[in-house]
Amino acid sequence: MYGADAAEIYDLTHSARGKDFPTEARTVLDLIRTRTKDTGSLLDVACGTGAHLEVFGRHFDRVEGVDLSAAMLEAARRRLPGVPLSVADMRDFDLGRTYSVVTCLFASVGYLSTAAELTSALRCFARHLAPGGAVAVEPWWFPETFLPGHVAADVVESGARRIARVSHTVRDGDASRMEVHYVVAERERGIRHFTETHRATLFTRAQYESAFHAAGFDVTYVPGVQNGRGMFVAGLV
């Protein structure tokens, strides 16, 4: 889960690394339209700072977001004043209403630890989906597409702020473990350093599809999109 330090620089660092939130959101919209034309409402699960949700808000009458990190939601509220945003765990939240579309992007389902948790989350998505609606879920890497030992490094300049980010990712049983170090230099605050550890389960494609079916979905996997991780697009049977 992202803390306050990471939430503050999240958009800057990921955009500098080439993540194109608007283009990704438009790709998701195109895929969703293969399942539903309903533009009444959308719920973005694990919405983070709201970068995808900002684009979705131009295409739906009503959008909402949930995330486990209060710090990320605080950044989303600054970006999207007036949009309902709630702290919630994707495995068991209950907002008491349904939506035309439910999305879960940036491989956030990878933070689920077991196939049982993945099924619980998808059942939760199903409970929040209106009849005839669609779900779009971006997976983490599959075991055969994950590259152990991956190293990344980036430097971001924004006004008087400089941010250096380095990461190293290894295989950890049935998951990946990424260690990330940040050094942030600012005129008024000086230099600070903080670290993050992200463990993401390497579910197989078959495990994803089994979980979707157990949750009552008819699902299609679309390869190649979202930086190569692909996308699962589903509707209730």
Image (cartoon, rainbow, N blue to C red):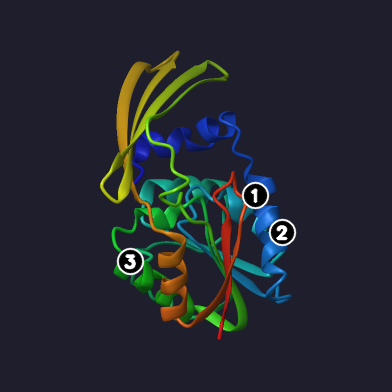
Question: Upstream in the sequence, badge 1 or badge 3?
Answer: 1
Instruction: Identify the residue at horizontal 60%, vertical 74% (top origin).
Output: 134
Mark drawn on residue 58: 2
Instruction: Identify the residue at horizontal 41%, vertical 75% (top origin).
Output: 124
Classify residue 30 by image quadrant: bottom right
Q: Nearer the viewer, residue 200 or 163?
A: 200
Question: Upstream in the sequence, badge 3 or badge 2?
Answer: 2
Tag 2's secondary structure? loop
Amino acid type assigned to the residue bearing label 2 in the image:
Arg
As measured in the structure, the alpha-carbon distance from the residue carrying label 1 to the one carrying label 2 is: 14 Å
Amino acid type assigned to the residue bearing label 3 in the image:
Ala
- The reply to whether the C-beta atoms of the residues labelled 1 and 2 are less than 8 Å apart is no
Mark drawn on residue 232: none
Q: Residues within 10 Å of mark 2 (few under 14, many from 20)?
A: few
Tell me where residue 69 appears, x and y as whole percent.
36, 51
As measured in the structure, the alpha-carbon distance from the residue carrying label 1 to the one carrying label 3 is: 26 Å
Classify residue 210 by image quadrant: bottom left
Q: Nearer the viewer, mark 3 or mark 2?
A: 3
Tag 3's secondary structure? helix
Tell me where residue 125 appears, x and y as whole percent.
46, 73
Mark drawn on residue 24: 1
Q: Nearer the viewer, mark 1 or mark 3?
A: 3
Residue ID for mark 3: 115
Tell me where residue 73 appears, x and y as whole percent.
44, 51
Q: Nearer the viewer, residue 146 or 236?
A: 146
Amino acid type assigned to the residue bearing label 1 in the image:
Glu
